[in-house]
Image (tube, helix red, strand yellow):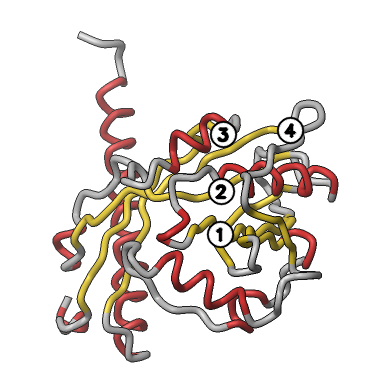
C-alpha cells in the first residue's frame, strides 16, 4: 500500500486532468463550429504528442505529426558552400513577382497544399532574409524565408530566428539546394540578432528534410499531432 492520502491525491489529479480535457474539448468544439460558420471545408486541431485521445468524438481524424526543430546559436555559424550551377538572391535582387510562383510550384505536391499569392506570402518579411536559389539563366529553383520573432514566456533564448517555406522546385530536388539556403539563412538570422533558430516540418516525411536539418545542427524540440475534420457534420448537435 502507498502512503496515506496517496489515493486521494491520485484521484484529485485524475479529476483535474479530466476537467482540463473537457475544457480543451469545449474550446475545440467551439472552434470547429466557428470554422464551419465561416465556410471552411475542413478544420485542423493541433495537440501535443500522446494527447490525441477523443479526436474521434469531434469527428477529427489523426492525419500527421508536426514537429518543431531547434538550433541554439553557439558561436558564429559556418559560411555555407554554394551549389554549383546556381546563384543566390534575396528579395532585394530577385524579381518581386517570382516568389509566390516558386513557392506554389515547390509545395504543390505537399500535404494539404494551398496556393499563396505574392502579398500574402511576402508581407512583412525582411528582404535580406528572403532567399532564392536561381539557375544560371535566372530561373527560380528553391526558396527559404526567414524572420525574427520575440516570444514571451518562452524558454528559447530570444529573439528567435524562424525559418519557413523551405521548398525546392521538383526539377531541382536532391541537389543540396535546401541545405545551402537554410545554412545561409542561419548565418543571416544570427547576423540580424537571433540567438536561437526554429523551423517546422512534417515528421517524418519522404523528402529527406529531417536528415538535412539534423546535419545543420537542428534537433527535435516539440512534437504535435494534427487532427483534421471535414465540416459536413452538425457540430451544434454535440
As drawn, is 8 to the left or to the right of 129? left
Closer to viewer: mark 4 or mark 2: 2
Q: Position of residue 78 (x, y in %)?
A: 75, 31
Give the CA separation, mark 3 to mark 4: 10 Å
Is residue 172 positioned above or below 43 on the image?
A: above
Query: In front here: 165 or 85?
Result: 85
Give the CA separation, mark 1 to mark 4: 25 Å
**Residue at label 3?**
218
Residue depicted at 58% across the width and 38% down the height = 70
As drawn, is 136 to the left or to the right of 204? right
Identify the image quadrant of the C terminus.
bottom left
Name which of mark 3 and mark 2 comes first in the sequence.
Answer: 2
* SS label for mark 1: strand
* SS label for mark 4: loop
Name which of mark 3 and mark 1 comes first in the sequence.
Answer: 1
Give the CA separation, mark 4 to mark 2: 22 Å
Name which of mark 1 and mark 4 comes first in the sequence.
Answer: 4
**Residue at label 2?**
177
Is residue 44 positioned above or below 155 on the image?
A: below
Q: Position of residue 43 (x, y in %)?
A: 31, 73
**Residue at label 1?**
142
Amino acid at each position: 500500500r502507498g502512503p496515506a492520502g496517496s489515493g486521494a491525491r491520485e484521484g484529485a489529479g485524475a479529476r483535474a486532468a479530466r476537467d482540463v480535457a473537457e475544457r480543451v474539448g469545449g474550446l475545440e468544439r467551439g472552434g470547429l463550429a466557428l470554422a464551419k460558420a465561416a465556410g471552411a471545408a475542413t478544420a485542423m486541431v493541433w495537440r501535443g504528442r500522446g494527447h490525441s485521445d477523443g479526436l474521434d468524438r469531434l469527428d477529427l481524424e489523426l492525419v500527421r505529426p508536426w514537429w518543431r526543430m531547434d538550433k541554439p546559436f553557439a558561436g558564429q555559424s559556418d559560411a555555407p558552400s554554394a551549389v554549383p550551377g546556381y546563384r543566390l538572391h534575396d528579395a532585394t535582387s530577385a524579381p518581386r513577382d517570382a516568389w509566390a510562383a516558386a513557392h506554389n510550384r515547390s509545395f504543390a505536391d505537399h500535404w494539404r497544399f494551398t496556393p499563396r499569392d505574392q502579398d500574402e506570402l511576402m508581407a512583412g518579411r525582411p528582404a535580406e532574409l528572403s532567399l532564392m536559389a536561381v539557375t544560371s539563366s535566372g530561373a527560380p529553383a528553391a526558396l527559404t524565408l526567414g524572420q525574427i520573432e520575440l516570444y514571451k514566456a518562452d524558454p528559447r533564448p530570444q529573439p528567435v530566428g524562424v525559418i519557413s517555406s523551405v521548398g525546392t522546385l521538383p526539377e531541382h530536388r536532391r541537389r543540396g539546394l535546401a541545405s545551402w539556403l537554410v545554412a545561409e539563412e542561419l548565418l543571416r538570422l544570427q547576423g540580424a540578432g537571433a540567438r536561437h533558430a526554429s523551423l517546422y516540418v512534417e515528421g517524418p516525411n519522404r523528402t529527406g528534410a529531417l536528415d538535412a536539418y539534423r546535419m545543420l545542427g537542428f534537433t527535435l524540440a516539440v512534437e504535435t499531432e494534427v487532427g483534421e475534420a471535414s465540416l459536413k457534420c452538425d457540430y451544434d448537435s454535440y
